[in-house]
Image (spheres, rainbow, N blue to C red):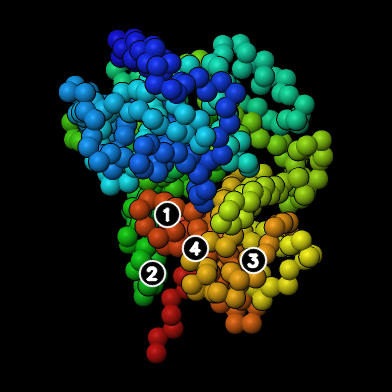
Amino acid sequence: MLRAALLLSLTACFARGSGAGGSANLDGVTFALKSSPGLRLSVDGSLPGAAAEIVFDVATPLSRVTTGCFDDVPTTGGTVRIPRPDGETDTANEVAVQGLVIGSHRYASFVAGARQGDRCVVTIGNDQLLPWALSVDVARRTVTFSKSQSVEHWRGLAVKPPAERAGYESHLLELTRDPRTDWPLLPVKVTQGPAALVGPFVLSTGEPVSQVADDAARGAGLRTGFELLEGIELPEGLQVPPELESFKGIKFDSFELAPGVGVREGALKALPGTEGRPRAAAGVLGCDLWGRFDAVIDVGANVLLLQRPRVLASGAHQRCDRGGRVDEESCFELQVAKTKAALVATGTIWRALPEGGQLHFDFSSAKGKISSPCRMGLTFSPTDRGESTQHELPWEQLASVMPACASALKDASVVELAMFEDGALPECPGTCAFAQDLRTGRVSCECQPQVAGIATDAERHFLRIYKQLLENRGNGLPPELEPEDPP
């Protein structure tokens, strides 16, 4: 019934669109995603009198708009009920959204549910997105709209990719729909040691971080944060760093979207719920996990198509099949765009980084290569395949903390990969852009959003300690956890 109501709403929106000077037809339109270290399907836009962030989210049954978009909120007098993955339901006033511009595309008028917020954010939900397939290019940070197709069409594309994706691996995953909420659901398997959670997760294109329901995780035997150290015998006198006690994330050894398809080692944000209230899903599959692939999301066809370069490994040596080449260099991809304010660099690593890694940049202007007092690039902690990040160069904080480094970039028009170095930069745990002053050694970082609600440094440190404790059980402690000698 919900699906029928949404389709009726969609039809009405198309009818209103022709008279409002905008169009709901997005066929063939490509939007550059809003610059951000973490992946999220959001773009710059506007409403009359307000700049807006536009978020495309297939996990939202009905479009939403914040009150910060209006001086006087144009309510229609109606109300709508919108379910949330945590088991709660929002009751919202209906708002007429008119004059919305997405990128440079003037969109048709439509009705959305209002929510409180000082910033102007418009979330486009499935009432508007059902007719479209969304193709996400992770390395270029773009989303392209095309008409929804049949499952057979996407299956054929998975079996025989276009020429520019020859050599890519393809995985066609079929979604289901929750009959009550109409959420797109994907069955996943999350493992943590001997414990495993198997259940449906809501596919989201608006949530940057994946989440798992607290009660579902505990019911499956998954432990959160500091609980993971329970049962591991530690020598008397061992001092575990106190910041780790704040770690509330749920560490996983593997997160499988299908057998053999997924991500190894990471953490999920705990999603609190309402006790006794039934859930339609065990969690939310966010952009941080499905975004390790280029993706086609066609909710109308109940399809998620994932593609990425194939990796050929021989021992520690890895090569990638991309763009007709099979070599180590094809495992690293750098895309650069120039805006009025800065250069925007997107770095993608298509192979695993068991020890982490650093991509170093060279900068050039019209006069040639730029000599800088700093070395700059991207750093990655140990991670699985498909990690990517995007940053403005220079980023906002760099100009205030290391002005000489930022100043060296003022004339830069070209960014190129200089070299790859194994091993992460300790001063910048996580996935970050970094600048290091070659004279003082001082480092500045801009990192991806924190996971599990705490500092990335503490989280990564905890996961590293936990893994080392398991690997070294019975063989002594890793060096960083050796008890201090008594005075």
Q: CA distance from mark 3 to mark 2?
A: 38 Å
Residue type pointed to by label 4: Glu
Q: Which residue is mark 3?
A: 409
In the picture, the quarter occupied by the N terminus is top left
In the rendered image of this protein, does residue 148 appear above or below residue 452? above
Residue under the point 44% across and 48% down: 267
**Whole-percent x and y of residue 148?**
54, 16
Q: CA distance from mark 1 to mark 3?
A: 27 Å
Mark 2 packing: few (<14 Cα in 10 Å), some, or many (20+)?
Answer: few
Work out whether residue 344 can be spotted.
Answer: no
Residue type pointed to by label 3: Leu
Q: CA distance from mark 2 to mark 4?
A: 31 Å
* Horizontal side of residue 141 vs 116, given as left or right: right
**Whole-percent x and y of residue 184?**
42, 23
Q: Nearest to the eye among marks 3 and 2: give it.
A: 3
Mark 3 packing: few (<14 Cα in 10 Å), some, or many (20+)?
Answer: many
Q: Which residue is mark 4?
A: 396
In the rendered image of this protein, does residue 385 appear above or below residue 30? below
Q: Which one is in front, 455 or 433? A: 433
Residue under the point 26% across and 28% down: 95
* Horizontal side of residue 70 vs 332, given as left or right: left
**Answer yes or no: do the residues labelled 4 and 3 have beta carbons within 8 Å?**
no
Q: Which residue is mark 1?
A: 450
In the rendered image of this protein, does residue 262 appear above or below residue 35? above
Residue 170 is tagged as none
* Horizontal side of residue 2 vs 235, given as left or right: left
Q: Earlier in the sequence, mark 1 or mark 4?
A: 4
Residue 241 is tagged as 2
